[in-house]
Image (cartoon, coloured by chain):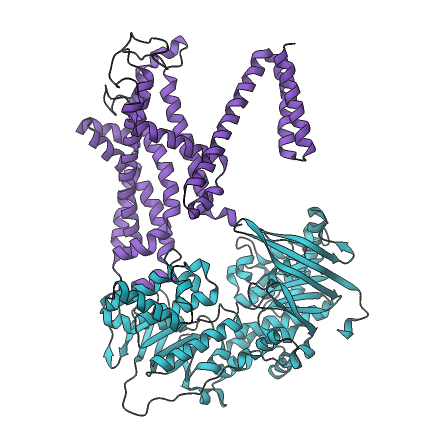
Chain colours: A purple, B cyan
Amino acid sequence: MSMFVIGYYAALIAASCIAAYFQNRQAFMLLFSLTLVSFVLGIVGGVPALQGVTVFAGILALAAGTSYAFREFLIQVSRPAIAKELRTAPLTAAFGMFVIFTYAIAGIFAPWIAPYGQSEVIASAFEPPNEDMLLGADQLGRDMFSRIVYGARNSVGLALLATILAFMIGALAGLYSAVKGGWLDQLSGRVADVIMSVPSLIFALLMLSIFGTYLWVIVLVVAIIYSPRVFRLTRAVAGNVVVMDYVEAAKLRGEGDWHLIRKEILPNSTAPLIAEFGLEFCFVFLLIAGLSFLGLGIQPPTADWGSMVRENATLISFGDITPLIPAAAIALLTVAVNFVVDWMLFRSSGLKEQ
Amino acid sequence: MSKFHNKGVLLEIRGLKIDGYSDETWVPIIKGVDLTLRRGEVLGLIGESGAGKSTIGAAAMGYARDGTRISEGSIEFDGMELTTATSAEKRALRGSRIAYVAQSAAASFNPAHKLIDQHTEAPLHYRIKKRMEAQEDAMELYERLRLPNPREIGFRYPHQVSGGQLQRAMTAMAMSCRPDLIIFDEPTTALDVTTQIEVLAAIRDIVDQFNTAAVYITHDLAVVAQMADAIKVLLKGEEVEHASTEKMLDAPEEDYTKSLWAVRSFKRPQKSRPEDESKPVISVQGVDAAYTGGAKVLDDVSFDIYPGMTVAVVGESGSGKSTAARVITGLLPPMKGEVLCRDEALPPRYQDRTRDQLRQAQMIYQMADTALNPKSRISDIIGRPAQFYSGLKGQALKQRVDELLDLIELDPASFYNRFPPELSGGQKQRVGIARALAAEPEFIICDEVTSALDQLVAEGILKLLDRLQQELGLAYMFITHDLATVRSIADEVVVMQNGKVVEQGAKDEMFTPPHHPYTDLLLSSVPEMDPNWLTTLLEERGVDNIGEAARV
């Protein structure tokens, strides 16, 4: 019995006892069932399994601590009205915000953060990590870490641009359809149906092979693919607002459509739209990464997470995790955005008031 | 209370305190209320909204609504302490020994099941009766509650019966296990006066017949006078006064109670049409209207509204009152006939009207909650029409908004930058009035403006509207089903039924017999403060035809 194992069980049992003493039922059940599971785990997997559990718990605790501190930081620096909202954010949402914040910093300050340029060849192909290269080199000998940082700028920036465009098209069409009704509503509804009936990846591949893989084509195609979803949501949300008496009052005042949309309807439908924005962003991001993986997205030598997965894919058969790093970056961002969106959906759905 | 003195105590609440969760802290909403209810006794709980009536009603079942908690006190039901009872124990009581009748039966019934299936659910669940027995019993109860076709009506779905029938079916459902206590939470508030009577009579009979104790929650004093043996008046979570019904009506002690009783006293002198040749500000002439593809909702409706006059349009729901307003505003173009504004025909669709024509007719809505944009500041809501019609900007606009806020008796300094959700119901309605005034109209349509408000607040709004009429010479079209309101502020009355104008004329003529039979029915159905009113009325009308009375 090593000191580690003894310490491991002692710490768990002590923590369970403390939880039991303070009558924190949930924490106690969690800790003590972990103790019991650890007995089995220790017998089956030995010391390494227990070490794995410890590392995992440590990472979880670190993430929780960071999220907590980050939330406090945000509360301190923001205005009272926003601070009050932030106080209601769960730790997962704070974690999501922290990750998004980190990615934003990495993207914005990429040239200063990255030690090498994104297309600079500095070592031999697939060189393992050393003190010069944090994550090793890729298939051409470029620094993996620098490319990840630049990738944050290229992939995320492009996805953001496409999502914003999709929202402008979809939301505007949705709002006008809700206000105007009649043939405009029918027309935009059927156009949305047509776009949605074409499988999105096939549609994107088709368009990109017709018009070439220029950046603006990618942005436009992705925006068009995703705008019908935004259209439908906006149309539904605005449809509920349009029937309100205050909109009727504004109509009877003789206000134009643009005033109705901007002042009366949009402020009352932002919450679900913002939440949808987060969700759509994830889908757009994944679609662009998918296109890049297929070689139709962002073209080399520009760093992009999707194509980085493809280029280094051969390494996976040698048991190296290098190709998984950009994949993990994508996954982490998607999870983080969803955490934040969950919180926003919870707030906008009014569940908290029930 | 003496008549129940020797009976056993059924429900005893001592020092009850309930907290509500808002803005992330617990605030007390019930601040120590005592209540004793004996078997067979009916207690009326009255007070304005936010007084905690419904919260106490729910607490009598040992139930704290979401976002509230019972913080102190004891609730003892037939020897059982409910505050410490487990949820399983409380669940066993509810439905079988304590039943609840909600305000809106239409929203409380499950639309996917037949009435009788919902009725028999509780007796079957508690294994009190077999299904066939329970159905027989339901039919018997329906008969006692004078529902038409008692043997057949239970097999309909909730949307297939009328609102009043649904409310009676719900009362029958509450009786299905012969509970000891029923909580009635404003059971007739959402109903027309004519249907209200049927429900009141039914509830009273059934409570008498089965010797059930009841807590009757309402904000309508006249209703509670008919139903209750004793009345408890609540204000902001505290008890103001408790006495037997006769004593409470004859000699209320507290000032607040007296002010509640005095609410219906507001009356202003009746004006008559101007003698000179002035034209009606709005004249509706022979209008027929229907919603797309539907039957006629308005049938040859004509009436005139002269400057500075208040014309009340009354009738039960579905009589076409609000549709008439939609035709005047241009939201619903008429099929036949026209709307004249000072002898000048208005275009049927509001989109075709000029700004000036739109400005002259403004509207105040029933539900102030949905009538004000929750995301706009008060200054924007009121300022926008002023800016839109008069082109005011900057300092001049700000001054105009201040003026309007002064006019509706709200302090500009504290309301200028607020949002509607931060306001109370009465304040919201005042902002709605200010928005209408900002356009400087000659004519305002008031669509049930006071029906969602408490009586004290409603009286304040009526006084305000009256003052504005005197100061600004406005004409009102006052849509309402509340004849007490009509009595207090109308100059002329238009009675509508099934889309037709049944009778119209000056108020004093309308309120003196002989009336049209429908007017008579409406007038006689308004509850009066006399506790024997319902009994007398039922004797006059005859008990048997009460269900059909609404369809004269």
The N terminus of chain A, quarter of image: top right
Instruction: Tell me, yes or no, if residue B39 can be seen here.
Output: yes
The outermost residue toward the right is: B6
Q: Position of residue A295 (x, y in %)?
A: 26, 21
A174, above or below B520, in the image: above
Query: Which residue ends up furthest to the left in the rendered image?
Result: A211
Name above or below for residue B540 compared with residue B44: below
> Residue A172: x, y in percent?
27, 47
Q: Name the residue nearer the viewer: B372 or B534.
A: B372
Residue A123, x across and y down, in percent: 29, 8
- Residue A139 sits in which quadrant? top left
Q: Residue at x 35, y 33 (%)?
A: A283
Residue depicted at x 59% and y 70%: B199
Q: Position of residue B496 (x, y in %)?
A: 42, 78
Number of marks: 0
Residue B332 shows in the view: no
Measured along the vertical axis of the image, is residue B278 above or below residue B92? below
Residue drawn 45% across and 38% down?
A: A342
Q: Quadrant of residue B461?
A: bottom left
Q: Nearer the viewer, residue B393 or B232?
A: B393
Give the farthest residue toward the bottom: B275
Question: Could you tell whether B226 is left or right of B277 in the image?
Answer: right
Up-down: is A281 above or below B333?
above
